[in-house]
Amino acid sequence: MVSAATTSHVTATLQPGQPSTAGSISVTSSPAGAQVYIDNVYRGITPLTLDGIPTGTHQVRLALAGYNDYSTTVEVGAGSTSSASASLSPIQTPGTGMAPFAAVGALGLIGLLVARRRRD
């Protein structure tokens, strides 16, 4: 009980804590929204911080449709937070960069041929 203008004393017996055998992994990606796999187990979507990860080395993989997967190894220490961050690169499909220009050029060429035939 605490009252105004008085001093109260508290007695507590402290117990030794258990040493932490787990840590955390913070995972980010650009663009955000990548699926996060820790040791090949799906754990969520970036950005994400996972607590209770056992200490030691863990494989982190990020996957996002239209982008190359990203993998790295992370060392998790007791009571600490390790980070994994990736700038995901878009999947390059051979020839897709010129396809729109080729289609426009082909349509233009067809238009010229049709116009020329109409003149004849």
Image (cartoon, rainbow, N blue to C red):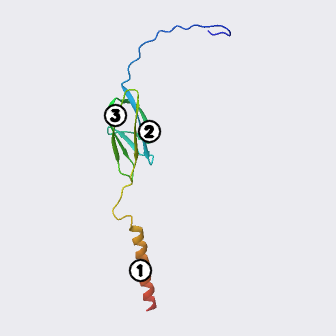
> Mark 1 near mark 3, Cβ–Cβ under 8 Å?
no
For marks 3 and 2 on the same chain, the one whose residue lies earlier in the sequence: 2
Residue at 44 percent of width and 36 percent of height: 49
Instruction: Say which amino acid is labelled 2.
Output: Leu
- Residue 105: image quadrant is bottom left
For marks 1 and 2 on the same chain, the one whose residue lies earlier in the sequence: 2
Which residue is identified by label 1? 110
Query: Which of the two residues, 1 or 71, is positioned nearer the viewer here?
Result: 71
Residue 95 spot, x, y in % from top left: 35, 65
Secondary element under disc 1, as helix, strand or loop, is helix
> Mark 1 near mark 2, Cβ–Cβ under 8 Å?
no
Query: Which of the two residues, 25 or 66, is positioned nearer the viewer here?
Result: 25
Secondary element under disc 3, as helix, strand or loop, is strand
Q: Nearer the viewer, mark 1 or mark 3?
A: 3
Residue 64 spot, x, y in % from top left: 39, 49
Q: CA distance from mark 1 to mark 3?
A: 60 Å
> Which quadrant: the N terminus?
top right
Which residue is identified by label 2? 48
Q: CA distance from mark 1 to mark 2?
A: 52 Å
Residue 94 spot, x, y in % from top left: 33, 62
Instruction: Say which amino acid is labelled 3.
Output: Glu
Which residue is identified by label 3? 75
Query: Which of the two residues, 44 or 83, is positioned nearer the viewer here?
Result: 83
Give neighbour class at mark 2: few <14, some 14-19, many 20+ (Cα, 10 Å): some
Q: Which mark is residue 43?
A: none
Residue at 36 percent of width and 55 percent of height: 91
Give neighbour class at mark 3: few <14, some 14-19, many 20+ (Cα, 10 Å): some
Q: Is residue 108 left or right of residue 76?
A: right
